[in-house]
Amino acid sequence: MKVTIVGAGNVGATCADAIAYRRIASEIVLLDIREGFAEGKALDIMQTQTTLGFNTKVSGSTNDYSKTAGSDVVVITSGIPRKPGMTREELIGINAGIVKTVAENLLAHSPNAIIVVVSNPMDTMTYLTLKATGLPKNRIIGMGGALDSSRFKTYLSLALDKPANDVQGMVIGGHGDTTMIPLTRLASYNGVPVSEFLSADELAKVSADTMVGGATLTALLGTSAWYAPGASVAYLVDSILNDQKKMIPCSVMLDGEYGQSDICIGVPCIIGRNGIEKIVDIQLNETEKAAFAKSADAVRDMNNALNTVLG
């Protein structure tokens, strides 16, 4: 199985490293526009093979899309990262052109590939990729919900003072500081609702911390995070290539599910070899439904901004 990752920066390189180390794919191609950058990152990863014990082939290329031919999954991380104080929405004009061109170039060499979109604003870039390529919606997946959910489970584990791997929870809605919806009502610790252990105020803080999880790291690091985003991409790619049928919140085109249409937004999906194999339409309560509708309105406003930028 072959994976191409466009953008060899922090997120792309971390994703490649995780996929290689976990032996998720047999071949990885890193591609970047900076001369020699992807080649250097790939060689650095390859030099960990003997110490970490994997045999995945990792190569790099400077903007030569022919090297990506025959990829089963392509991951788009390219675009400028968020700077401190910058919202995902402010990235739209710059990153839209980059993502559209990258997707078209990738499909010219890997027409059957499943595309995973990481570039921000992620929901709108997923929508753009779907519209620009004309691919069926199961083959275009926005990664954000997987990352938001991992942050949610981390904050829950810290509040519970329990292992994160024993905590279950998911985040739906838009991949933005004000649009994501941590489903605290459905979160659990080893099958027991977390509300049995945490007060309403504690759960509200977990939810608030989750929603600004990316911005918190941007303020601390001076740029966007990369370890958790890279690992979340690898987790998603693993479920695709190995047909694991995991339920992962992803940004996907809705056609009536959750009362929404013609919008890409985060909802729980079954992820397998065909990409989005099923959208899981869970029963939300009235408060959650209202929050989701508000989130969808915000994402749709950004899509309208995209259409304005593109003319």
Image (cartoon, grey):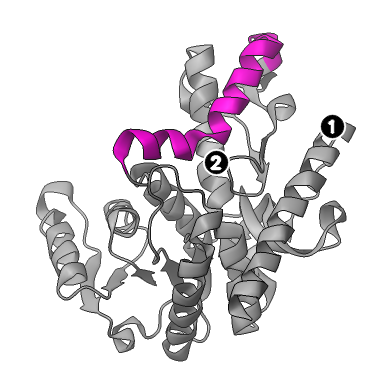
Q: Which residues are magenta?
A: 195-222
Q: Is residue 135 left or right of residue 95?
A: right
Q: Residue at x 39, y 67 (%)?
A: 78
Q: Quadrant of the C terminus?
A: bottom right
Residue tagged by mark 1? 287
Q: Which residue is mark 2?
A: 148
The image shows residue 121 at horizontal and vertical percentages of 54, 58
Percent x, y of residue 145: 58, 47
Visible residue check, residue 196: yes
Circle 2: residue type: Asp
Specify few, some or many for label 1: CA neighbours under 10 Å numbering under 14, 14-19, or 20 or more.
Answer: few
The question of residue 261 being in magenta is answered with: no
111 vs 263, nearest the viewer: 263
Name which quarter of the figure residue 178 lies in: top right
Q: Residue at x 34, y 54 (%)?
A: 11
Give left or right: position of 117 versus 169: left
Residue visible at 66% across and 43% down in the picture: 179
Image-based side of 310 in relation to 215, left or right: right
**Disc 2 element:** helix
Residue count near mark 2 (Cα–Cα under 10 Å), binned few <14, some 14–19, many ≥20: many
Looking at the rendered structure, the kind of residue marked 1 is Thr
Residue placed most toward the observer, 33 or 72: 33
The quadrant holding residue 259 is bottom right
- Above or below, comparing residue 1 to residue 226 in the picture: below
Is residue 220 a member of the stretch shown in magenta? yes
The circle on residue 174 is none
